[in-house]
Structures are given as C-alpha cells and as structure tokens.
Image: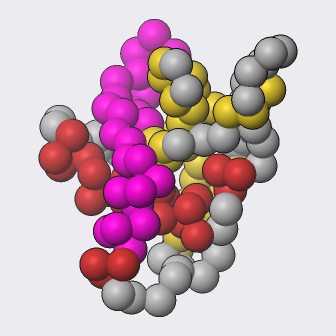
C-alpha cells in the first residue's frame, strides 16, 4: 500500500521525525501498520529496539493512525491491521542499516493496561 511521509509526530511531548508509514502484508490475514523512524544509533537486537520503538507503537495505537485504511480483496473479507511495527534505521538507501520490531494489537492493549499511565498527547 502507498507510503505516507515524511512527517513529524509528537511522541511523549517530543517532536520526532517519521520517514514514512505504510501497510505491510505479513501473510494470510496479517496486515501490519509500519512506521519508519530514522535514528542516529540503531539498537542491535529486537530486545533493545522494542523500548525505543514502543512510544511510536503506542502513539499510533492511541491516535488510531493504524486504522486509516483497510484492504479489500475480491471475494474475501476486509483485512484490517492486526499489528503495529516500527523500522528503526540509520543511513540512506543502499547504506541504510536497521531493525524491525512489531507487536500485535492484543499485545499493545495488554502493555498499555499493564502500564496504567494515561495516553500520550499528540
């Protein structure tokens, strides 16, 4: 699906660059809303990347940005996003390096409920 961006998001009160947002089909019945975020230092592991990506995932969830579109395949049900992911990257084109992390909508809801803090302001 078409790419949107670049743009600025206000995440946790801080203006943050977003290079692009788009939908990524991950397999049968799975659609991920993906946010590309440029970084000076990209984490090396998914475990290290998730805390960096989490504010973007939460912001996209709470602001319902992932719901801006759905996909309708002829003869099938409408496919709604089931995940939100973030691609953290550094560099340009062929020289870019990065890491992707993502969470299901159910996992995002659980993390927000466990956190108990109010929603971040856009």
x, y percent for residue 98: 34, 29
- Residue at image position (32%, 32%) is 99
x, y percent for residue 59: 54, 66
User: Can residue 5 be seen by looking at this rendering?
Assistant: yes
User: Can residue 55 be seen by looking at this rendering?
Assistant: no
Q: Specify whether 9 is left or right of 35.
A: right
Q: Specify whether 41 is left or right of 45.
A: right
Q: Quadrant of residue 69?
A: top right
x, y percent for residue 94: 45, 10
Q: Is residue 7 magenta?
A: no
In depth, the one of 37 and 69 nearer the eye is 69
Q: Specify whether 13 is left or right of 90.
A: right
In depth, the one of 9 and 81 nearer the eye is 81
In depth, the one of 22 and 95 nearer the eye is 22
Q: How many marks?
A: 0
State which quarter of the image contains the N terminus: top right
Q: What residue range appears in magenta?
A: 87-112
Q: Is residue 90 magenta?
A: yes
x, y percent for residue 85: 45, 42
Q: Specify whether 42 is left or right of 33.
A: left
- Residue at image position (83%, 15%) is 74
- Residue at image position (56%, 62%) is 61
């Amino acid at each position: 699906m078409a790419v949107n961006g670049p743009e600025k998001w206000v995440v946790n009160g801080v203006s943050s660059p977003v290079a692009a947002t788009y939908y990524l089909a991950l397999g049968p019945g799975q659609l991920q809303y993906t946010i590309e975020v440029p970084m000076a230092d990209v984490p090396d592991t998914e475990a290290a990347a998730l805390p960096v990506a989490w504010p973007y995932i939460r912001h996209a969830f709470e602001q319902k940005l992932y719901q801006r579109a759905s996909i309708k395949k002829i003869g099938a049900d409408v496919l709604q996003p089931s995940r939100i992911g973030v691609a953290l990257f550094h560099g340009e084109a062929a020289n870019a390096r990065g890491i992707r992390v993502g969470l299901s909508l159910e996992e995002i809801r659980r993390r927000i409920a466990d956190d108990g803090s109010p929603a971040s302001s856009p």
